[in-house]
């Protein structure tokens, strides 16, 4: 057997093992969500009795479970953050890529240095700043946290804007276009792929975040929780035997909007790449 064939078999085997290890927890979560039990069952991988009752119970709010409200809160926060963050990222990337000013290089280096530090290091400072303005335990405070520093993540978008022909922008400037006109009417229409990437990334951050949501929404008011904080509450030692399967149901449901978003945006992603190749 040739070395190349052995290498392909070994490569595919490793990928298969990794794929199985990645899929097993997801399959177990989905199967457990359709279990007829309420608590954790580790005796068998697949439940002996199947039911959708836990999904029904999840949609019926009680003193602990307020999933419909949590879902609505998270959707509102994620949508607002997505819009604001996407605009920040694209505008900063455009400024750093297609415009020239004296502080440009220094600001780029400073942004890269800031990105080297984990965002968690700013948690205490951010909390006290929000507390000063009475924005703790509010969804506006969370939106500000997720959106305020989003412009620092401009590097990938800048890399895409670097491929935009400079002659196109220069011709527009000669014709009397302002920078805002160039940005909105020329650059944005040919930048669908990076817009899709930015939209998905901006939506995922607040949708999946637990740490900042837990820190800001610390008053114990259940109706203000996001999905991550609310589902985590179900894992409390005194509640897990009653709500664990509902927790699994919640985990399955929160993955649906992400899947739908990707399926919808994938069409525009392919269209943007195709149009860009033809125009280029």
Image (cartoon, helix red, strand yellow):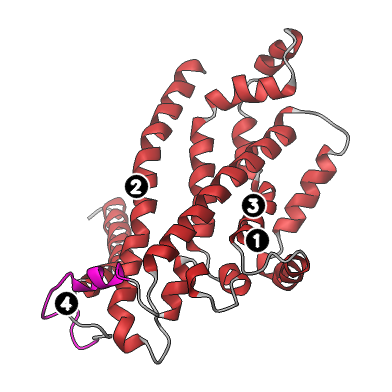
Residue 73: % across, % down: 48, 60
Q: Quadrant of residue 93?
A: top right
Looking at the rendered structure, the secondary structure element under dot 4 is loop
Front position among marks 2 and 4:
2
With 80 as the anchor, is 120 left or right in this view?
right
- In magenta stretch: residue 171: no
3D distance between C-alphas at marks 2 and 1: 27 Å
Towards the viewer: 71 or 108? 71
User: Residue visible at 30% across and 86% down?
Assistant: 242
Regarding residue 21, the answer to whether it shows in the image is no
Q: Residues within 10 Å of mark 1 (few under 14, many from 20)?
A: many
Whether residue 237 sits left or right of residue 138 in the image: it is left
Image quarter where the N terminus lies is bottom left
Mark closest to the chain's N terminus, 2 or 4: 4
Specify start and end residues of the magenta stretch as a single range. 42-60
Residue at mark 2 to residue at mark 4: CA–CA distance: 27 Å
Residue to which mark 1 is pinned: 141
- Height in image: 7 above or below 121? above
Q: Residue tagged by mark 2?
A: 260
Disc nearest the viewer among 4 and 1: 1
Q: CA distance from mark 3 to mark 2?
A: 23 Å
Label at residue 147: 3
- Asked if disc 2 and disc 1 are in contact, CB closer than 8 Å, the reply is no
Q: Nearer the viewer, residue 170 or 57?
A: 57
Q: Nearer the viewer, mark 4 or mark 3?
A: 3
Tell us which disc is closer to us: 1 or 3: 1
Query: What residue is disc 4 on?
Result: 46
């Amino acid at each position: 057997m040739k070395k190349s064939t052995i290498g392909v078999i070994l490569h595919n085997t490793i990928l298969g093992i990794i794929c199985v290890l990645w899929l097993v927890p997801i399959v177990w979560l989905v199967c457990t969500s359709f279990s007829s039990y309420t608590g954790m069952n580790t005796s068998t991988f697949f439940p002996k009795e199947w039911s959708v009752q836990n999904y029904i119970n999840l949609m019926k709010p009680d003193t602990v479970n307020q999933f419909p409200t949590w879902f609505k809160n998270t959707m509102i926060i994620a949508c607002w953050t997505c819009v604001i963050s996407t605009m920040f990222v694209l505008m900063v990337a455009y400024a750093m890529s297609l415009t020239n000013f004296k502080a440009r290089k220094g600001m780029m280096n400073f942004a890269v240095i800031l990105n080297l530090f984990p965002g968690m290091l700013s948690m205490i400072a951010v909390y006290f700043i929000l507390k000063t303005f009475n924005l703790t335990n509010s969804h506006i405070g969370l939106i500000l946290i997720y959106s305020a520093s989003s412009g620092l993540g401009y590097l990938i978008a800048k890399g895409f804007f670097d491929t935009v022909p400079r002659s196109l922008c220069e011709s527009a400037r000669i014709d009397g276009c302002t920078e805002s006109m160039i940005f909105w009417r020329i650059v944005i229409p040919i930048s669908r792929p990076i817009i899709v990437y930015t939209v998905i990334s901006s939506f995922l951050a607040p949708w999946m975040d637990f740490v900042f949501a837990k820190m800001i929404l610390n008053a114990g008011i259940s109706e203000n929780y996001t999905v991550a904080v609310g589902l985590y509450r179900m894992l409390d030692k005194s509640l897990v035997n009653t709500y664990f399967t509902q927790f699994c149901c919640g985990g399955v449901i929160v993955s649906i909007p992400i899947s739908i978003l990707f399926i919808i945006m994938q069409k525009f992603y392919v269209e943007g790449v195709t149009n860009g190749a033809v125009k280029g």
